Amino acid sequence: MNPHEEKPDLTKESAPQPESAESLAGLLHANRLRKGLSLQDVADLTKYSKWQLEALETKNWGVLPQGFVLRALVRKYAEALHIDPDLAIEMLAKETGNKAQSGKSENLVSSLDYKMSPTPTDKVRSGGFSLSSIFWLLILMIIVVLGVAIWQGAISLEDLNLGFVKDWFNAV
């Protein structure tokens, strides 16, 4: 062997061809290696942690979030590697069954389902008292207490400086 010949660097992984990658994990892994990026490089690009990206490449679905969060992770990873994100999401759906819900959910109601009107037609009342209700109730209680006190003779209208009220009733 010629000593001047370059030896291959065996510390680096060899990247499988992306076209031969049959799974999402293989596709992402192959493209990352082909571009010469480490998991940390991709983590810096996507703002996802290195362990999440590694779990994605090793198909460790149990430690990854589910639902739209997983789809967002896959989409961001694919975009960072310049892979079609829709293809990556489609591969994810085939492998894990994680797909976006199509159509309307019966339990979810959108604000777009309601017609806009200038005045609300149905007023929703709370179970408690409003401030104005408490104010009017307090005024009514004061009037009742004063009325009973005057009727019982405990106080007179003159005591309250309301002698003019007696004059009104006498004038009528």
Image: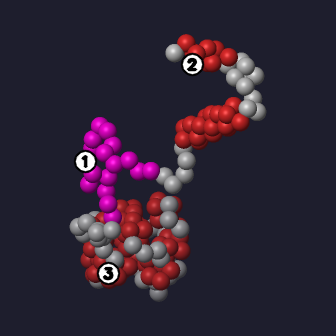
Please check the rendered image and state whether residue 21 is part of the magenta-colored stretch, yes or no.
no
Residue 106, by quadrant, is: bottom left
Tag shown at residue 71: none
Residue 108: x, y in percent? 33, 64
Q: On the image, numbered disc 2 is attached to which residue?
A: 169
Q: Secondary structure at mark 3?
A: loop
| Residue 157 in view of the camera | yes
**Amino acid carrying mark 1 in the image:** Lys
Residue shown at 32%/60% (left/top)? 109
Residue 55, above or below 155: below
Residue extent of the magenta highlight: 108-125
Q: Residues within 10 Å of mark 2 (few under 14, many from 20)?
A: few
Given contact means CB atoms under 8 Å apart, are the residues at marks 1 and 2 in contact? no
Residue 170, above or below 112: above
**Amino acid carrying mark 3 in the image:** Gly
Q: On the image, numbered disc 3 is attached to which residue?
A: 97
Residue shown at 55%/47% (left/top)? 129
Nearer the camera: disc 3 or disc 1: 1
Q: How many marks?
A: 3
Q: On the image, numbered disc 1 is attached to which residue?
A: 115
Residue 51: x, y in percent? 53, 74
Q: Is residue 153 left or right of residue 26?
A: right
Nearer the camera: disc 1 or disc 2: 2
Query: Is 69 in front, or is 133?
Result: 133
Q: Is residue 69 left or right of residue 147?
A: left
Given contact means CB atoms under 8 Å apart, are the residues at marks 3 and 1 in contact? no
Q: Earlier in the sequence, mark 2 or mark 3?
A: 3
Q: CA distance from mark 1 to mark 2?
A: 56 Å
Q: Earlier in the sequence, mark 3 or mark 1?
A: 3
Query: Is 105 in front, or is 139?
Result: 139
Q: CA distance from mark 2 to mark 3?
A: 86 Å
Residue 143, above or below 79: above
